[in-house]
Image (cartoon, rainbow, N blue to C red):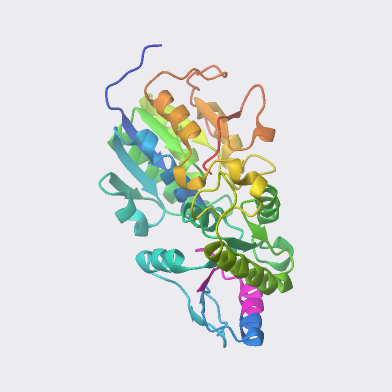
Amino acid sequence: MDGLNTPQRILAVASGGGHWIQLMRLRPAMARHDLAFVTVDSGYREQAAPARFYTVCDGSQWTKLRLLCMAAKMAWIVLRERPDVVVSTGAAPGYFALRFGKWVGARTIWLDSIANVERLSLSGKLVRPYADLWLTQWEHLALHDGPEFAGSVV
Amino acid sequence: MIFVTVGTQLPFDRMVRAIDEWAGLTGRRDVFAQVGHSSLRPRHMEWAQSLAPPVFQRMLAQADVIVAHAGMGSIIMALELAKPIVVVPRRAELGEHRNDHQLATARQFVDLGLVRAAFDEREVGPMIDSLAAAQGARNASSDRCPRRKAGCSRYDPVLCEARDPREGCPKLVMTVSRFIDGEHSSRRSAAIAPEAAGGVLR
């Protein structure tokens, strides 16, 4: 397949803490493209600049209402941004971003957090039908049908 | 300076208490702890519940040794700054975390030679002592390792041949970059999944 070479519209999504830091380690891959970030903490806005920046509610499988809030806002963001590519290092916000990204025909990348050493994360498992590139950062977790191993952030 | 952090989510009193005691016993006056939303009031070190990001970054940069819970954020930040780091894994049975993945993280990263880990909090103090001493020796003596780069924080000379985290992650960046440019072909078929009805997360 020929390279596209035109700048792509990218939506890059991560929860806070280690998830965000791992997304930042991928930033060089997205540098020349039209970039927007989504996370759960407005404190990361400065680091995201000059890219566009959104926050959504923080939530997990144990906080259903927050997940609803998160999903609703993520849907709005995806429909507004209309990304060509959605990338996420997890967790729940990334699941919604990839899933909704498929509504607008985006190509999607999931990079499971390097913290998930023994098994893939829950969101990493659930996102499988919606991830075109489905990656783990540990070779011993890679399987023939995915997730694939393509290196790690450290 | 020894910089201690419990991460951004939960307090970690077991670790903070152990370090405070060690600081008192050894008479260290150069320890700073970010303790999170905790009721602890350390007596032998300076502390704050939280730090604004620029202040946090500055303290990380100034630290000789970083001591942290075994969270990926803390570990990666230490690696990027080439700072020696001791991690204390949170344990689910003590209510310190939802699960025990920090134990797995810590073991894996010790195996990779990237961190030291105190699985028992009583080990933290002695580990900090030996790391700080090694750092001092590293600074003082001429480096005999032919491949070692300045400021490398690896503990096992054999592992110094591995990639330095400060250089980024070129293999992964290349994979993601090629995918974005439409050049990567995944082993999985890249079929667009039809939106299933329902699908409420359990």
Decide if residue B196 is in sight here. no
Q: Is residue A70 left or right of residue B108?
A: left
Image location (x, y in percent) of residue B19: 63, 77
- Verify whether residue B97 appears in magenta: no
In the rendered image, the vertical position of residue B137 relative to residue A128, given as above or below: below
Q: Nearer the viewer, residue A97 or B50?
A: B50
A52 left or right of A87 in image: left
Q: Residue at horizontal 42%, vertical 24%?
A: B178
Q: On screen, A14 above or below B103?
A: above
Q: Nearer the viewer, residue A153 or A121?
A: A153
Residue B188, given in percent of the width and then of the height, sits at 57, 19
Left or right: residue B106 versus residue A94 is right
Front in this rendered view, residue B76 or A7:
B76
For the point 46% across and 56% down, the residue is B81
Residue found at x 65% / y 33% = A139
In magenta stretch: residue B14: yes
- The segment highlighted magenta reads B1-19
What quarter of the picture does the C terminus of chain B occupy?
Answer: top right
Residue located farthest toward the left when viewing the structure as drawn: A50
Compared to B68, does A10 lie above or below?
Answer: above
Where does residue A39 sit, x and y in percent of width and height? 40, 49
